[in-house]
Structures are given as structure tokens and as C-alpha cells.
Amino acid sequence: MLWVRGRFWIGEVLLVLNLANLVMLYFRHSTYPRLIHIPIVSAPLAWTYVAILWDGAAAVNARSLAARIVANVFIWGILALGAFYLLIFKDYTMGFELAMLSLALAFGQITTHTIAVQWVFAFVIAGLLLVGTLAVAIPGLLGEGRNARPSQSIVDEDRERAPLLDDQ
């Protein structure tokens, strides 16, 4: 059984390397159209983060009380990662994908242990991410994003010619 856990650790290292690769890809190509951004960048990034938590639990054989406590702490990293991408990049796709994965985790954990709170945390995280995602996505989809006021995006004709005029 020890050789099986060793393979989980190899998988954990590979997942962390993949996460670093996907984060670099995200920072380099975060402005691509959504039809390209979702399947190539944001969905694999969200899944890889959750897979790191999943594989890590398998690698340490998370059956003890201490492992469950650590899992209850690490699950909040899903909310932190989603909030980072929602607040900094206004990327509602990451928020929605992490909310779906968190909801799937919640439903999967309901019947795992009789006394466990990880599923409660997962439902709370999914709800918070969904609310944050809607708060970011709805104004962006309605065109009320960065250039909400047309006066900011249109330069006055006199102001544009002003550096060319001789003020003497």
C-alpha cells in the first residue's frame, strides 16, 4: 500500500507543476475571447486546483481527524482563489467553475462522514462564489464594464487637437 501512496505524491508534484504552467498561461492570455478562454485556460486551472486538494487527500490517506481538520482549512482556498480572479481580473468564468466544483464537492461529501462539516463549508463557498460571479458577470454582460460612461471613451475634438495648436 505504501507504493500506491508514493504514486499519489508523484501525481501531486505533477499537478503543482501543471498549476504553475496554467497560472502562467492565464496571466499571459487572460484577455482571449470567452469561447477560447474557458476550455483552454480557466476550466483546466480551476480543475487542477481542486485536483491538487483531491490528490493530496489521497496521498496522505485522509481518514483521521487531523486530516479532516486540514481538509476543512484547505477547502477555503477554493474561495480565496475564486475571489482573487473575480476581484482582480473580473473573470466570472473562474468564479462559476470553482462554484460548480465546490458544489460537486459538497454533494459528494454529504454522505462521507456522519459528523463532518466539510460539505457545509463547500455549500457556503459555492454560494459565495456564485453571488460574486453574478455580481461580476451581470454588469460585464450588460456592457456596464470598464467604459460604462460614454463620456470617458470619447475624446473631445478640441482636446485632441490641443497639443497641435500654438498657444501664442
Image (tube, rainbow, N blue to C red):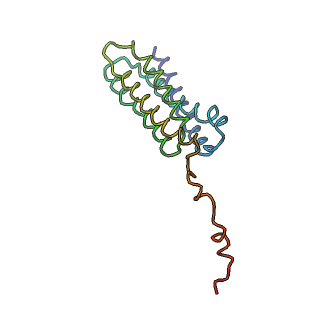
Question: Total number of numbered labels?
Answer: 0
- Quarter occupied by the C terminus: bottom right
Q: Is residue 7 above or below residue 94?
A: above
Percent position (x, y) of residue 126?
A: 44, 28
Residue drawn at 55 percent across, 38 percent down: 20
- Viewer-proximal residue, 4 or 28? 28
Residue drawn at 55 percent across, 30 percent down: 14
Q: Is residue 145 above or below residue 46?
A: below
Q: Is residue 68 above or below residue 90?
A: above
Residue drawn at 45 percent across, 17 percent down: 2
Percent position (x, y) of residue 66?
A: 31, 23
Which image quadrant is residue 19 in? top right
Q: Is residue 89 above or below residue 110?
A: below
Residue drawn at 53 percent across, 32 percent down: 46
- Residue found at the very far bottom of the displayed protein: 168
Percent position (x, y) of residue 10?
A: 53, 26
Percent position (x, y) of residue 15?
A: 54, 30
In the picture, measured across the screen, residue 94 lies left or right of residue 28, that is left
